[in-house]
Image (cartoon, helix red, strand yellow):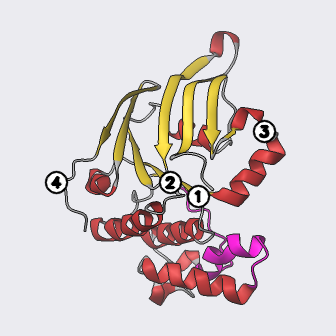
Amino acid sequence: MIPSKVGVEIRGVKKSFGAGHTRTEVLHGIDLDVPFGEILLLVGPSGSGKTTLLCLMAGLLDFDSGSISVFGTRLESLSAEAKTQLRADALGFVFQQFNLIPALTAQENAAVPLQVRGVHRTEALRRAGALLERVGLSPRMRARPADLSGGEQQRVAIARALVSEPRLLICDEPTAALDGETGSAVMTVLRETALREDRSIVVVTHDSRVFHFGDRIARMSDGRITSVEPVARNNSRN
């Protein structure tokens, strides 16, 4: 049972890197909610702190002060082992680097998270194949990463992130390597996943072509959230 309509709640979060004279504060008291059943787009210039904020949400980095609650659990109260377990159980990631395993086919790469969880290989491959079909890679399932274009590799990475049905999907520029049509196809898949009442998606993007797939846009500048606004509903989704 979901305790609230908010999947991620961030309050007063500050983050710095370095120490002494080299200390640089990159996040200055972030307040942000990520509701269930929504795609939240995080936009802003390079260096504004977007990727750092994603890493804090995922428990990949520790923050200096403030609080981050994920599914009602405060990250600052968790051990490193508990954060690792939370990521394994409930989070999915799509970063700019594809991080595919060179020796595996596209289908095998997409199936890896399920096999790590103990799902039988046959079932894992079936579910991975279904997702690859949805992102337009049905003819390329048996190709290895070296034989795929950058856009195709990104779609494999997205299928891999979605295959275990994460409650929180964290994406850093998921359409950066894709043409407009393929980017729209990928965002349609993400949209369909986000519409579940117990799931959320956060997407860092500079790609204005996909803004209309989001529900809200949070704008960042110089380590601060400057505005959070709903996406205009007169934009049609493809």
- Which of the 4 image quarters holds residue 141? bottom right
- Of residues 111 and 91, the one nearer the viewer is 91
The residue indicated by pointer 2 is: 200
Residue 142 falls within the magenta-colored stretch:
no
The residue indicated by pointer 4 is: 234
In what quadrant of the picture does the N terminus appear?
A: bottom right
**Lower sequence index among marks 2 and 1:** 1
- Which of the 4 image quarters holds residue 235? bottom left
What percent of the width, then of the height, locates residue 100? 62, 68
**Lower sequence index among marks 3 and 2:** 3
- Residues shaded magenta: 97-120
The residue indicated by pointer 3 is: 78
Given the image, on which type of amino acid does mark 2 rest? Ser
Real-space CA distance between mark 2 and mark 4, rounded to the nearest whole angstrom: 23 Å
Q: In this view, does 230 lie above or below 166?
A: above
- Of residues 49 and 199, the one nearer the viewer is 199
| Residue at screen point 49% across, 85% down | 140
Real-space CA distance between mark 4 and mark 1, rounded to the nearest whole angstrom: 28 Å
**Lower sequence index among marks 2 and 4:** 2
- The local crowd at label 4, few if under 14, some if 14 to 19, many if 20 or more residues have their Cα within 10 Å, is few
SS for tag 2? strand
Q: In this view, does 71 lie to the left or right of 46?
A: right
- Of residues 85 and 151, the one nearer the viewer is 85
Q: Is residue 218 above or below residue 188?
A: above
